[in-house]
Amino acid sequence: MANGRVDIEALKNALSITLVAERLGLQVVHGKFRCPYAMRHAHGDRTPSVSISESKGLFNCWVCPDVRGDIIKLVEICKNLDFKGAVNWLENEFGMPMSFEQAVQNGALNSGDLQPAPLIKVVRKAPEPEIDPVLRTKIILAFFEMLSPVEGSPAAAWLVKRRIFKKTWEKMRLRVITDYDKVNRGLLEKFGLEVLQKAGLFNDNGNLRYYKHRLLFPYLDSKVIPRYFQARSIESDTQPKELNLRGQVPFPFHVSLLDGEPGWIYLCEGCVDTLTLIDRGFPAVGIPGVKSFKHEWANLFKNKRVILCLDQDEAGRAGSRLVMEMLQKAGVEVSMYGEGITVEGFQMSEGQDMNSWFGGKK
């Protein structure tokens, strides 16, 4: 085997990082797995902290600064191998793609051929098919028109337990799926399976993805049209607790507050924390998670004084530092909760989030 750059890059480009992680014994669920150094984490990394980017072939732990990299680095960490040992392990498990020169030498090709035949059958998952944004918005709007108000549903009691009340449900247009079968059939009849899968609402089995996640938090644009949403399960034993719509998040949750006018903004992690502050009159905006803030969003916060209110744990603080850096580069004044900043004069303790601090019960 020749460990030249061409061969190594071919190996990394050919293999799915998700498949490699699973072959290493890691349980990958919705693009996340528990850190190999779980002992460093609070509660043994019970909530997985390592994220996978399948399109880039990379992984990243939001707590451990040394747990990140490509498929070779992942093997090094999990198998306690050096670089050469990790490459050898991948070759033994999956086979090694040959360079053009190697293929000619080994007789797999003639020198006049343009490229060698692929020798690795496992390839990175192809990108999800694109859908016209206007059609996607139309589908999301039709979906929400089939849903029910929160009041009178089991989700209402769940929200009250989390200290989020009716005035906020109505203001933020929260909805629930009360008749899953009816919504499932209605969408299929109106749009067809292929389009619904491209839009991110239906799974590979041909069903609406939100069978267990029936409480919906819409991302409303300036015209109060739902352009994206996050779904939540109210059952304590469901994992993951939240299920986002597949595809790009177009803007932060409660984006209407980012109007370019001077003022304060409290930036939270997740819809529940954001709704908690909205319910108490704070100008709050949310992002789906610590890793989800996009560089292009920073300009939306111009003229605002931002307080980052992400979870008070290692991952939350690490995420806050990343967001703070992006906002500061855009010229936005920003402070991190916990560094001389409090809410109503009080400080959250380690492990708390905004909802639990305000008395929300999980």
Image: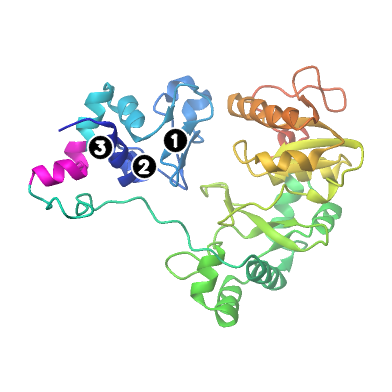
Helix, strand or loop: magenta stretch: helix
Query: Quadrant of the image for the C terminus?
Result: top right
- The circle on residue 17 is 2
Give the distance between the C-alpha atoms of the residues marked 2 and 1, in whole angstroms: 8 Å
Q: Earlier in the sequence, mark 3 or mark 1?
A: 3
Pick the front one: 142 or 165: 142
Give the distance between the C-alpha atoms of the residues marked 3 and 2, in whole angstroms: 17 Å
* Location of residue 205 in the rendering, given as x and y in whole percent from the top left corner: 42, 68
Query: Quadrant of the image for the N terminus?
Result: top left
Q: Check disc 1: other Cα within 10 Å, few if <14, some if 14-19, many if 20+.
A: many
Magenta region, residue range: 91-106
From the viewer's perspective, is the residue at label 3 or at label 1 nearer?
3
Location of residue 255 with respect to 131 vertically, above or below: above
Say which residue label 3 marks: 7
* Residue plotted at (51% across, 26% down): 43
Say which residue label 1 marks: 59
Magenta stretch contains residue 95: yes
Give the distance between the C-alpha atoms of the residues marked 3 and 1, in whole angstroms: 21 Å
Corner quadrant of residue 260: top right
Specify the color scheme.
rainbow
Q: Are marks 2 and 1 in contact (CB under 8 Å)?
A: yes
Corner quadrant of residue 162: top right
Q: Amino acid at mark 1?
A: Phe
Location of residue 345 with respect to 119 vertically, above or below: above
